[in-house]
Amino acid sequence: MSGTLKYTVFKTAMGWVGILASEKGVLGTTLPQPTPGEATTALGPAVKLAGKDDGALEDLASRVKGYFDGRQVDFHDVLDMGRYKPFQRRVWEATRRIPRGETRSYLWLAKHVRRARAARAVGQALGKNPFPIIVPCHRVIASDGGLCGFGGGLEMKRRLLEMESGKKPAHGEPPGRPYKRGPVAGG
């Protein structure tokens, strides 16, 4: 089975990131981790069945590095979502369409996937997002504009939103909220 799954781990400006892929597409990515070993482990148990293949995933790895360098990049990659529920897939696909530098609320996203009363379920689907950055769940915020609910922690969410907005905090400056707030409830 190691011939059908492949992975790579590489250093970005914010830490080590891993990518796991099947023949059908990307199976998972990680948020930046402190070490290559932690990035590998964060890919989950399937990584034990995968072969390390930096070359096969070089294009995506290069774009992820560019993203963490603050460049505008396109993640048009095919995602292997076959083992997930249809609702999760709809939430993740809708989340992929949130433009860089903008945010949307959980309620907006629930309405967008035609489940207006399912904002909490949207949050749960995003909490299980195996494709961070490609599916930019960090762009989803509370209806009141507050940051909440991110697997990488609120500080990481804040840093990603600031990076996407083009703001670079001065050394020692507490992160602010410079990102453009997108439509929220009823928007």
Image: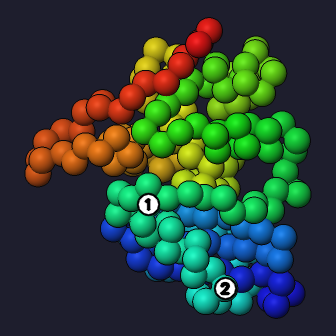
Q: Where is residue 179 in the image (x, y as percent from the top left)?
A: 36, 33
- Find residue 74 and report its horizontal and vertical position in percent: 56, 57
Q: Nearer the viewer, residue 141 or 186?
A: 186
In the image, residue 116 sits, relative to residue 74, either above or below, namely: above
In the image, is 127 to the left or to the right of 9?
Answer: right
Q: In the image, what residue occupies the spot 46% across and 33% down?
A: 102
Is 126 left, or right, of 152 in this rendering?
Answer: right
Q: Residue 9 carries which label?
A: none
Residue pointed to by mark 2: 56
Q: Does residue 159 appear in this view?
A: no
In this rendering, the answer to whether 108 lies above or below 164 is above
Residue bearing the label numbered 1:
67
x, y percent for residue 14: 35, 64
Q: Residues within 10 Å of mark 1 (few under 14, many from 20)?
A: many
Sort mark 2 into few (<14), some (14-19) or many (20+) by Cα contacts within 10 Å: few
Residue at far top of view: 186
